[in-house]
Image (cartoon, coloured by chain):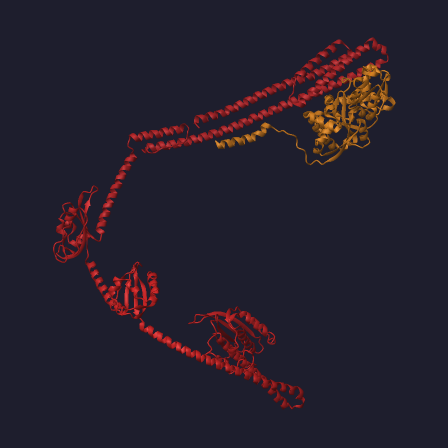
Amino acid sequence: MGRFMIAMLIVVGFALPFISGCSGEKKQDASKKDEKVTITVTPWPGSAALYIAKEKGYFKDEGIEAILQSYRSGHLGLDAVLSKKADLAAVGDTPIARAAVHGHSMAVVITLCEIDRAVLIVARKDRGISSPGDLRGKKVGVVEGTTADFFLHILLTTSYVKPADVNIVHLATDDVVDALIRGDVDAVSTWFPNTVVATDALDDNGVVFDDPSIYKMTWNLVATKQFAESHPESIKRVLGAIVRANAFILKYPDEARAITAKMIGTESLYLDKEWEGYNFTAALNQSLIVNLEDQARWMIMKEPGRAGKTVNFMDFIYTDGLKAVLPEAVKVVRR
Amino acid sequence: MKIATRLKFAVMVPATMAFVVGVGLIFSYKMVQDAQEKDKAVQRIITGMNELGSLVSEYVFYHQERPLQQFLAEHDTIAGLIANVRFREKESQKLLEDIRRDMESMKGSFLKLVSNHDRYRSAEGYRFGQGNELFREVENRLVGRLLVWSRDVASDASILERRVDERLIATQRKINVLIVAIIVVATLSLTMILKAMTRNINRSLMTLRRGTEVVGAGDLDYKIKMSARDEIGELSRSFDHMTEQLQAVTVSKNTLQREIEERKKVEAALLEQREWLRVTLNSIGDAVMATDTEGRISFLNPVASALTGWPAQEAQGRPIQNVLRTVNELTGDPAEDIVKRVMADGRIVNMANHTALVRRDGSRIPIEDSAAPITDSAGALLGVVIVFHDVTEKRRAQEALRNSAEKLRIVADFTHDWEYWRSPDNRFLYVSPSCERITGYSPTEFVDDPELYARIIHVEDRQRVVEHMKGDLFHLDPCELEFRIIRRDGRECWISHVCRPVLDDQGNMLGRRASNRDVNDRKQAEADLQRAHEGLERKIAKRTAELEWRNRELQEFANVAAHDLQEPLRKIQVFGDLLQHEMSQNLSDSARDYLARMTGAATRMQELIKALLAYSRVSTKTNPFERVDLRHIAEKVVDDLAMSMEEKQPVVEIGDLPEIDADPVQISQLLQNLIVNAIRYKKQDQVPAVKISGRWVKQAGRKNKYVELRVQDNGIGFDMRYLDRIFLPFERLHGRGEYEGTGMGLAICRTIAQRHGGSITAESRPGEGATFIVTLPVRQAGEPKKSGELNLSPFSQETPTGKKK
């Protein structure tokens, strides 16, 4: 019987691998060399995948030495990429559309996340504002050329308020909240964390307008076309790290939130409510192109002489990188 | 484990396998079902999205109620479907959540679109006027959003569908592999179990079969003894039990065979024993006869037959008295019938001494015999056995022994010395008659009173002798002793005692045999001799003292004379040198020659005087003996001679030399003289080579150890017929012109050697070098005797104050 047991054990030992199947994370290629890549980030939840990839060493595993440069808003980061001070920028769709319309050649390599309530209108009740229609004749502060600017427009129009009927005041990013609190403006169109700061400051005097049905913001990773075409391997490795970070966010949301809060420099509890509206997609959707085209049309319409010409945004989507890493995430129809 | 149990277990394996496979298949079926349901749901979502997209288009085109209602209905259906679907995988569930969210947004956008259209168609819309553009913009945006939601939902649903399919395939693959693995494991295990079972069963059956064959052959003692606990084991134990039962009732053939063999063995043993007894009895050197209870002969061995003269067959059955006729050897009267006596007494009876057997032919043989009863195990008399033998030779040997002892006794009794034999327990076994002549006491007195011996010993010697008698009793070596006794008449008598042990053939101590001789006369003579010797020694000592005094006087005279002689010689030399230095120019050649000869002669005279002084001092100016290292002295001598002999560049080799008791100064002088001679008498144009060696020697007749010192050279050598001459003073074998020297060196060496109790000699051949051999004792007891050995020197010796006499 002793020999029988030994034979059984041998057979089971051989069978076990077949039963259990392969599992576990893929092995990292030890032959990859570390390459420096500079990425601009805006300290808000949309940049979570980048923060986590850095914190958990996913960039390092891919052989990328990621240098994260923090900017107050995405369009400033995009400017850094266009002026070759950085390689990749995390930025919303509106600055991308504006840069494209102005003739800059770019490549969107991935949409990091989609946000339902990315931008909000925060208004003062004491200025007689309780609905979007009350914004007629009021001063509304906004940073020109940003997603907040676009959102203000579509919210007004879908609320049947002509934009011309609103006194739009262009503000600097750092001045938006202060202007509203000071009363220099009656309302502002802005994004996190300004929205949180403004609503906390106004408290009961504040009212918030949003409409997820009219706009879903995309937060994207962009490079110049030249960089994307000359560094395809770097793009692939960065995307590989981001895909792993996204899987981490899905598996360990609490820890992902805590890391993001730490990197942003805020309390984790502030992100608890905000986190619900962020859809960490790590994909390239058709909705990105639609968004970009919609915003391009808005820009051209707003300033016909200055905005530039219409563009084919299919040329601004770089799918090779993501296709090599996660083919199913590429949902953009290509020719 | 029972076979049935094993079989059950073996059956269980495929059953278990089937069960597991069944469970796997059921699980797989459930998973497939679940995947199919999900797939159906996702398909429905995709279809629904397509439908909603169409309905949106229709509404945009026609703005009718129907597409609106259908959109809402279809949306609610799909929303409800989504709400009822759950995915275990987080990624898939997230996708579903995204779809649900997009669906919500899509509905919101669609309702806004409817509201926009209604607003446009109402009075508010017209009132706007230019608001047409606004409404169009809003409509375009909302339609765009709707298309985006629709596209995204469809895309997500496709991904979801693909994931469901992939998961289903993966799960099915896993289950298939599991099933295959289970089948393989089960098959292997079943095969091994069955194989083991088969082997065990076969082995058991073989053992059982073998057992049945053995038992069937008749061996009922055979036991299968199978330890297995299965059915076959039980069968074997039942079989063994059956065999035991059979054995108990029926006689085993083997047992019978064994009994027969046992009996045969016993009979064979009995026969063998009988034959052994017969051979033994026939081989016995004594005559053996046996009778029955009526005294009739039942056995007669060949020796008995030969002695009695009756053949066994004739004697058989006859009355013992007819065959074994015995008479008194001395008187001739019939001897006692010992057979009757044995039968009467029932015990062993020995024949009387001097019994003779009357043979059939009437001749007589002296015999010794005994008879004993033959009884059975119960003690009942069965007969008598008589054993006897011819003692003719024994009688003769005894007679010879008696004669020999008598002779020895006569020899011992007539020895001049007092002989005795003392036993190990200190009794006198024999004392010769001479003891009476020597001691005054008779042998009988010593035999009767062993302590008498000790009492007659002189009181001063008694303890020594008594201790000797006690301690040396068992000493195997002969020992000698001299002591005094006090004779019966009171006179002292010296006894020279010699004794040695007496041992038998086996080496056992029988005592000590001693011989005491009267040596009184010899002792007296020794005492007289001793007295004469002492007187002579006194005379010799006196004479020696006179001689020493005269020697000292002569040596003093020689010393003073040598010294006084040296003074005028020195003057001759000094004035001669002065003449040579100051007046040589004024002298003629012949005068200078005469002067040179004169100074040369004076110089030689000085050297001779020095040599004589040295020679004389050998005996007079001595140092006490002390332990000296000969090698060390030789090295020092060579070192001292290095300067003076530098010209000749000798090669001196010093071997291992021992330490001896000697006068270090004189030994140094001896070695120096020998080495100087060896170098001086070298061959022309040859480097002188000297080899000094030593060895231990034993001189015959002397107890002391000696050292032989050898000084060997490669010089001119000498003829051995001049050996004695070279050691005499002033003797030279070569002229002064050939080799320098005074001729005293070797004489001095001889004197030194003799003073140390040694000697000197030499071995040589002309032209082949010479070897001088000095033999010296290792140890010195004291100063060697001067008389008879010393050459008395005419030279004086210095007084202790250093003044000449």
B373 shown above or below B628: above
Q: Quadrant of the C terminus of chain B?
A: bottom right
Q: B665 left or right of B7?
A: right
Residue most extreme to the right: A305
Quadrant of residue B172 within the rendered picture: top right
Q: Quadrant of the N terminus of chain B?
A: top left
Q: From the rendered image, report the letter of the chain displayed in red.
A: B
> Which of the pair A76/A252 is nearer the observer?
A252
> Which of the pair B235/A130 is nearer the observer?
A130
Residue B296 visible in the displayed image:
yes
> Which of the pair B264/B64 is nearer the observer?
B264
> Which of the pair A264/B800 is nearer the observer?
B800
Position in image of residue A5 (x %, y %): 50, 31
B360 shown above or below A261: below
Residue B736 visible in the displayed image:
no
Position in image of residue B36 (x %, y %): 63, 18
B316 shown above or below B447: above
Q: Residue at x 66, y 88 (%)?
A: B583
Quadrant of residue A251 within the rendered picture: top right
Shown colour of chain A: orange
Q: How many marks?
A: 0
Position in image of residue B760 (x %, y %): 49, 76
Position in image of residue B202 (x %, y %): 42, 31
